[in-house]
Image (cartoon, helix red, strand yellow):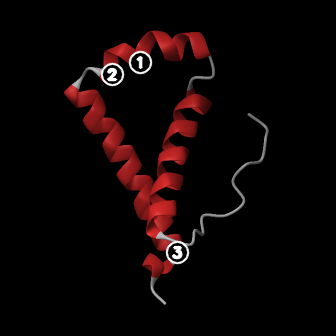
Amino acid sequence: MSDTWLNSLETDTPQEGYELAITLSRRGVKYTQPDVDVLKKLRPEYANSADGLTAASHVIATNFQTVAAANNYWRK
């Protein structure tokens, strides 16, 4: 992937920050496995796995921590 899509981690609200964290997580998977057919083949395995869903939630939470810190936890 050579397209530039992430210009900043700064967001106006925590909700926008959480959505950015999800986007970061999804793009990370896509970047790691660029073959869409493989992604579609593997999705049922982790989509129906408690461990897979927990792992995905952990990645999102880690990315949200990063975004929150970049936004000074939305303190004014």
Residue at image location 33% in from the left, 15% down from the top:
45
Q: Which residue is mark 3?
A: 71
- The amino acid type, in three-letter code, at marker 3 is Asn
- The amino acid type, in three-letter code, at marker 1 is Arg
Going from the N terminus, do you reach mark 2 or mark 3 first? 2
Q: For this view, does 60 lie left or right of residue 27? A: left
Q: Which residue is mark 2?
A: 46
Total marks shown come to: 3
- The amino acid type, in three-letter code, at marker 2 is Tyr
Q: Is residue 53 above or below residue 11?
A: above
Marks 2 and 3: CB-CB under 8 Å?
Answer: no
Q: Is residue 66 above or below residue 76?
A: above
Instruction: Specify the label residue 73 is tagged with.
Output: none
Quadrant where the N terminus sits is top right
Residue 9, horizontal then vertical, whole percent: 60, 64
Going from the N terminus, do you reach mark 3 or mark 1 first? 1
Which of the 4 image quadrants contains residue 46? top left
Q: Tag 3's secondary structure?
A: loop
Circle 2 Cα neighbour tier, 10 Å, few/some/many (<14 / 14–19 / ≥20): some
Q: For this view, does 44 lie left or right of residue 41? A: left
Q: Is residue 2 above or below residue 12?
A: above
Q: Tag 1's secondary structure?
A: helix
Residue at image location 50% in from the left, 14% down from the top:
40
Q: Which residue is mark 1?
A: 43
Marks 2 and 1: CB-CB under 8 Å?
Answer: yes
Q: For this view, does 18 lie left or right of residue 46? A: right
Q: Tag 2's secondary structure?
A: helix
